[in-house]
């Protein structure tokens, strides 16, 4: 059982772990021991998460969210399988905690009078520059 907050727990049936060989340096160990962990959480089917939390979790998870509504967290940071398991569970819990907090609604504000004036002055100056780019006269002023 994975504890997220005081009221939210993830049951063991919602989590599945798979161990594979890690990439990168590891000496003689790297080709023999499966230390990398792939933690799969069935988020869409979880009865402990509400629908708004699942929607925010889907947006936060990004590419880690699969077609069938699961989140996959892959960890191969250390050479220890047990430590990689702990890190994967911590990352999943942190991701769910961040999805629990609802974003504050944005309150639209009006632009200040100074910013409006600066914008219009910049537009007028730019228009003047562009109007001066016309053809040069054909020399009527020369005698």
Image: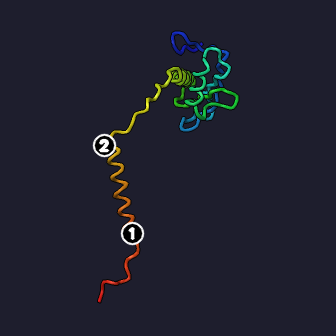
Q: Which residue is mark 2?
A: 114
The residue most toward the bottom is: 143
Measuring 60% from the left and 17% from the top, which residue is drawn there? Answer: 49
Q: Position of residue 108 (x, y in %)?
A: 43, 32
- Describe the element under mark 2 as helix, strand or loop: helix
* Residue furthest to the left: 143
Residue furthest top as drawn:
7
Q: Is residue 87 above or below residue 7?
A: below
> 97 or 121, which lies in front?
121
Residue at 53% from the left image edge and 15% from the top image edge = 4
Which residue is under mark 1? 133
Q: Position of residue 131 (x, y in %)?
A: 38, 66
The structure residue drawn at horizontal position 36% and vertical position 49%, both measured from the top left corner, is 119
The tally of labels here is: 2
Does residue 141 appear in this view?
yes
Which image quadrant for residue 11? top right
* Among numbered discs 2 and 1, the one appearing first in the sequence: 2
Q: Nearer the viewer, residue 46 or 101?
A: 101
Residue 94, above or below 139: above
- Quarter of the image that includes the N terminus: top right
| Quarter of the image where the C terminus is located | bottom left
């Amino acid at each position: 059982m994975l504890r997220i907050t005081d009221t939210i727990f993830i049951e063991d049936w919602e989590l599945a772990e798979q161990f594979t060989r890690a990439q990168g340096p590891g000496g003689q160990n790297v080709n023999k021991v499966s230390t990398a962990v792939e933690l799969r959480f069935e988020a869409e089917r979880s009865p402990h998460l509400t629908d708004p939390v699942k929607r925010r979790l889907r947006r936060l998870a990004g590419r880690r969210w699969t077609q069938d509504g699961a989140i996959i967290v892959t960890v191969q940071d250390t050479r220890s399988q047990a430590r990689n398991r702990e890190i994967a569970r911590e990352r999943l819990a942190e991701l769910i905690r961040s999805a629990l907090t609802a974003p504050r609604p944005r309150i639209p504000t009006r632009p200040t009078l100074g910013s409006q004036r600066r914008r219009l002055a910049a537009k007028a100056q730019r228009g003047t520059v562009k109007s001066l780019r016309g053809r040069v006269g054909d020399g009527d002023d020369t005698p």
